[in-house]
Amino acid sequence: MTLTREEILAMGIGNELDIEIAVTVMGRERDKFRSGWIRLGDLSTYPKQYSKDISAAWEVEERIKEMAIDAPLYIGYYMTELQLIVGNKGFDMVHATPEQRCKAALLAVLGL
């Protein structure tokens, strides 16, 4: 399923957004037998709560930095998307929520 920019921005905090982050950004595989689960090797599990937990969201940002080794524009795309989502007033980007960081990462990686 291909997501649109509008669909990503409309996603709320929770499993749907977390699954998309796990698969699209973090490189995990969807579980073919359990909806809302991912595969970690031989194990099936729920994804981390990327859209709710700031430490998990920081892992997403670290992954963006890793991806930028081969494609340097990812960081610029991510920062631009984050700024468009949170605004450009003072410390808005610093105080971005995990949900906002996740949406920016998805939009950057998908090029939307």
Image: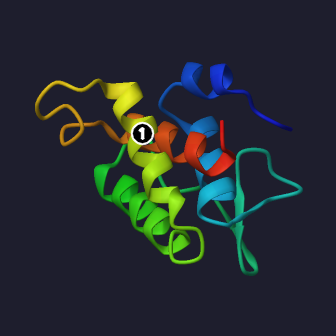
Other-residue count near label 1 (Cα within 10 Å), few / some / many at <14 / 14–19 / ≥20: some
Q: Is residue 41 left or right of residue 18?
A: right
Residue at 19% of width from left, 31% of height from top? 92
Q: Is residue 33 left or right of residue 87?
A: right
Task: Say which quadrant the C terminus sits in.
Answer: top right
Quadrant location of residue 2?
A: top right
* Residue type, numbered disc 1: Thr
Q: Nearer the viewer, residue 60 or 56?
A: 60
Residue at 58% of width from left, 56% of height from top? 47
- Image x and y of residue 74, in percent: 52, 57
- Examine the rendered structure and indicate whether residue 12 appears above or below residue 62: above
Instruction: Tell me the residue that label 1 is attached to.
Output: 80
Residue extending furthest left?
A: 90
Say which element carries label 1: helix
Residue 46 in sight here: no
Q: Nearer the viewer, residue 67 or 76?
A: 76
Give the colour scheme of this rendering: rainbow
- Examine the rendered structure and indicate whether residue 67 appears above or below residue 36: below
Q: Nearer the viewer, residue 71 or 82?
A: 71
- Image x and y of residue 36, in percent: 71, 45
Q: Is residue 38 left or right of residue 79?
A: right
